[in-house]
Image (tube, helix red, strand yellow):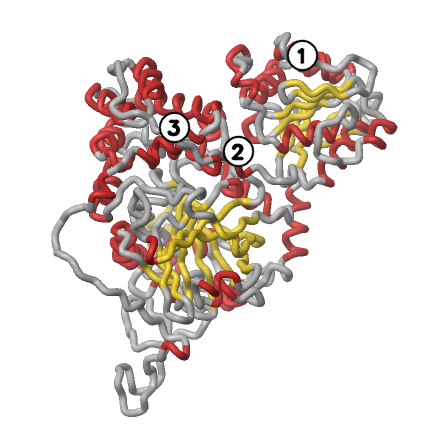
Amino acid sequence: MSSSIGSAVRHAMAHVTDNAKIKDLKRDHVNISSSSGLTTDFGSKISDTDNWLSVQGENGTQGPFLLEDHIAREKIHRFDHERIPERVVHARGAGAHGHFRVYDNTASKWTFAPVLTDPSRTTPIFIRFSTVQGSRGSADTVRDVRGFAMKFYTDEGNWDLVGNDIPVFFIQNAIKFPDFVHAVKPEPHNEVPQGQTAHNNFWDFVGLQPESAHMVMWAMSDRGIPRSYRMMQGFGVNTFTLINAEGKRVFVKFIMTPQLGVHSLMWDEALKLAGQDPDFHRKDLQEAIENGCYPKWTFGIQVIEEKDEHSFDFDILDATKVWPEYLVPIHQIGEFTLDRVVDEYFSEVEQVAFCTSHVVPGIGFSDDPLLQGRNFSYFDTQITRLGINWEQIPINRPVCPVMNHHRDGARQHRINPGSINYFPNRDNVGHPVPPSHGGYIEHAQKVEGIKRRIRTPKFQEHFSQAQLFYNSLSQHEKNHVIAAFSFELSHCDDQRVYDGYINVLNNIDFDLAVTVAKNVNGPVPDKPVRINHGHKDQTLSQLYYAPKTPTIASRRIAVLITDGFNLTEVEGVRAALASAKATTWIIGPRRAKIHSEGGHIISGSGIVADHHFEGQRSTMFDAIYIPSGSEHAKNLASNGRAVHWIREAFGHCKAIGAIGDAVDVVKQALNLPEVNFANSGVDDVVSSYGVVTTGKYDVSSAVVDALEIAPSPKGFVSNFAYQISKHRCYEREMDGLTSRVAY
């Protein structure tokens, strides 16, 4: 789809997506047009922005530049200071605006926070997604944890829910955070590797810190390489508390689940995308929003009453543990939507700042030892990056009134007229607000114990939930975990490192440890360190989150054509796919008009390609479709890059659709007798290993192809869309077909 369509949708919807925060940000918008003239920062108009004031000799020779040129000095000075310190972790990110609402007042039994209990409210939000390890210049698709940080602009103040796409963390206690970050970052002697954990230091650390075993299993699963920000879960990770109107407190975890399902890239695909399109995820987010296919998540909470805190075989305050859903069900209380891209990346995405300590009345903290440290650290790091007045930056400031006696500091924007800047004072201005009027109050928790540096007994068990996670995966997901460990540990050249982690794996699953050990030349264990308990939880597999109604909304489909393609067929298929909110992209031998079958080479009909075969790759699309046309089919079959498109899409388990003459092109490209294809000239549809083919597609075919995303003997688009909706055909991989195709 052309960018002009997305732009039109964006402008048409701009007024619809305005909310209190968007209107607040517009106070700081600077709108420029062709009539806008340049000025200095102090407002003086500039007549020349291309030439530094200098001395010229009488014979036209260049003389020295003059320091008196304040215009040039200001321009250079401002440029020299454009950058601010990047985040220590989560440096690379993307973000968008949206809104949140609850379905009803179900949560009022646990909290009096209106943001979670008032269905009449629509709360503006901003979400920043990010990777953890890499710098701002790293790639989007590396294997890594993804940040999922949410800022709720509530009427009671900002609530920051600073989470990840994985529900657990590498460490239990915040004091270990500097060690973890030092170990996961590029090694200090050579600043290598960038954006990945496949190096000695990371695996040395996690091998000697077994509390990380559970998190490492998640990171090495498909969760570590999400297909899209829009297709990953979000988790608050830490244990928070909720307080209701009667003052009763419960423990809570927050879970965000995408309505498109939870999907991932293939590892080979992720590697290639890191080079072919390192901005893949941020572009994907913008494309979906600008095309009106707004990302949506359900918002759920898990609740444990105080009386049940110690009723589990794990400590509910341990951030390396999940609360299994079969023990603690999720209550879906609301949903949120992202419906507006940012106007300027730096001002919004780079300067947005979050603090786990930012909560509103009705939400509180627990004694989670990781959370306690985060509450200290986050505020401190924002001061380093943005200054003490960072909460006055437009993207960070609340939409509700702000009043206090804080004063001065760098980049202070607020002006407080009057003589009083303290409390108590003679006029009682700026006074505390009692809880009955909305003032924040801490839960009256009884605390007693012995002060010492130690971890309680339940914090000493590290492998049971790692086993639960691995056991719960489907076979193809387990295979991907094995491949991930084999890749990562093979990049460690210190034998002590990969030998040590084989022992960790042997605490989780014996067969896993043996297979990885053989792949990386590590010590092959002869018996398990501990027996795998065998328990499963279906909600830990990504397959559990497939949408109940199949959808191809926002899926990107490449249409491969050369001169001589069937234009009528292409237009019909594209229209059907567009009706289901998928986008189609014409890929041809050149970025120009591709002439249709029977069309004159100069004046004939055709389509202008969005990209040429070398300008994009199959990795950037969810599926490929090849129309009929005898000349077009011959051209494709003789084009090595086009053949590679087909093989690569097959190797990455993506849906492939072909009609008429194109069926033989796919058949020859794959050369796999196990894959069945449709016969020439008939409109029966054959779907085999995610390859959907039909002998012909004409007007009568289109009539019966009313798009219902489901398998059927008729309806090429219906069957093709169904295969796309499954995200991938992993049966290819399981049956060994992908390993027989060169891609």
Q: Amino acid at mark 1?
A: Lys
- N-terminal of the pair, mark 1 or mark 2, is 2
- Relative to the observer, which residue lies in front, 457 or 615? 457
Asked whether the beta carbons under mark 2 and mark 3 sit within 8 Å of each other, the answer is no
Is 27 left or right of 404, judged from the image as shown? Answer: right
Residue 45 shows up from this direction: no
Q: Is residue 44 above or below residue 694?
A: below
In the rendered image, the vertical position of residue 192 relative to residue 636, given as above or below:
below
Q: Amino acid at mark 2?
A: Leu
- Locate residue 616, reporting x and y percent: 57, 28
- Helix, strand or loop status at disc 1: helix
| Residue count near mark 1 (Cα–Cα under 10 Å), binned few <14, some 14–19, many ≥20 | some
Residue type beneath disc 3: Gly
Q: Which-is-in-front pick, marks 3 and 1?
A: 3
Quarter holding residue 392:
bottom left
Furthest residue toward bottom:
426
Out of 323 and 440, give the one closest to the viewer: 323
Residue 417 position within the rendered picture, expressed as x and y whole percent measured from the top left: 36, 84
Check disc 1 and report the residue beneath it.
667
Determine the image quadrant of residue 674.
Answer: top right
Q: Which mark is residue 543?
A: 2
Q: Secondary structure at mark 3?
A: loop
Give how far apart the Cα atoms at labels 1 and 2 are: 29 Å
The residue where tag 3 is placed is 534
